[in-house]
Amino acid sequence: MTGSGAELIDAHVHVWDPDRVRYDWLAGTALDRPRLPADIDDADGTVSRWVFVEADAAPAAALDEARWVAGLDWPGLAAMVVAADLEAPDAGERIGRAAEELPLVRGIRHLLQGLPPERLAAPALAGGLAEVGRAGLVFDACVRWTQLDALDRLLGDAFDGTVVLDHLGKPPVAAGLRSDAGQAWLTALRRLARHERLTVKLSGLPAEAPDAATLRGNGPDLLRAALDVFGAERCMVAGDWPVSTGADGRTTAREWFALVRDVVGAHDWPRVAAGTARAVYGIRD
């Protein structure tokens, strides 16, 4: 159960309004309608704060999306991870503009998921990542499990900024931990753990599962493996609403948080439920 008395911060939630900001990927999907703070699945009121994460708006609309979110009536908004094109020649200026204009900006995300290997290895991306570090912001890394080694190479030995791996690196939920794919994911995850300032979001598995039964069967093993690799102090829980939880997700937020808490255990739950998110995203109040 989520009702342990511990503070609960949902470290990864999206909102959008296709009538205000352009999202090409939404067209023709069940998610193609406004998703506003009042609609969020808050696990029956147990979530008190949220971290907004950019929702892959059209590149030219990245700052517009951030401004729109910052202007919403959303008392529980604790931090924002906004989009910035790290491959752009003026990436540093874009990052600085967003951080200066919007006080809740704590992180930057440039979607790596699906990028070809040559772009993940290009100097332009590494240069943009360095700009995130220089700005003192967090980099949210969204990759699939087959890209984890490419992420490791991108971070290299010199990058000392804070990185958050979204959704456990999107492991092969259908195959499960004991499969060849699952073991390859775990091996790559262990390599990433050498980056001491890299933390992991325990989130996103419902969207990767083919059905609810597979999520219940294979999800706990994957969560437990990530927790064993990084420890509670480097893990945070998140719902990934509305993609993973809510009416269009595989489960409800309450069910997802309860599943994670059962894996984490009561002793470490306060850290995973809120402590890590507070430390990483600089949430003070």
Image (tube, rainbow, N blue to C red):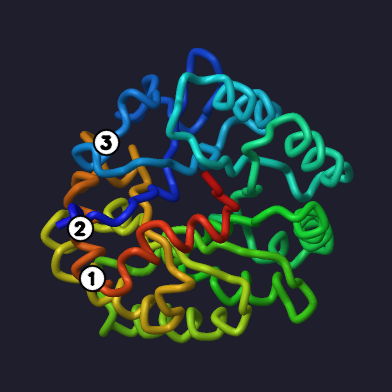
Residue 19 pos. (x, y %):
49, 13
Q: Is disc 1 surrounded by few (<14), some (14 to 19) or many (20+) residues within 10 Å?
A: few
Local packing at callout 2 (Cα closer than 10 Å; few below 14, some 14-19, many 20+) is few
* Residue 171 versus residue 129 in the image, above or below: below
222 relative position to 189: left or right: left
* Near-viewer residue (269 or 97): 269
Residue at the top extreme?
Answer: 19
Mark closest to the chain's N terminus, 3 or 2: 2
Looking at the image, which is closer to me, 252 or 243?
Answer: 252
The residue singled out by tag 3 in the image is 41
Q: Which residue is mark 1?
A: 266
Residue 98 appears at what percent x and percent y? 74, 35
> What element does badge 2 sit on?
loop
Instruction: Name the mark nearer the viewer: 3 or 2.
Output: 2
Look at label 3 and name its amino acid.
Asp
Q: Give the answer, above or below, for where 261 lies relative to 95.
A: below
Instruction: Please report the residue visible at 65 percent of the width from the left and 23 percent of the height from the top.
Output: 64
Q: Which amino acid type is marked by label 2? A: Ser
Marks 1 and 3, how far apart in space? 23 Å
Along the polypeptide, which appears first: circle 1 or circle 2?
2
Q: Residues within 10 Å of mark 3 (few under 14, many from 20)?
A: some
**What kind of residue is marked 1?**
Ala
Query: Quadrant of residue 102 in the image?
Result: top right
Q: Secondary structure at mark 1?
A: loop
Q: Which mark is residue 4?
A: 2
Up-down: is 135 above or below 148? above
- Residue found 52% across the figure and 29% down from its top: 24
- Residue 194 lies, in percent from the top left, at 60, 84
Q: Earlier in the sequence, mark 1 or mark 3?
A: 3
Image quadrant of residue 265? bottom left
| Residue located 34% across and 80% down the image | 225
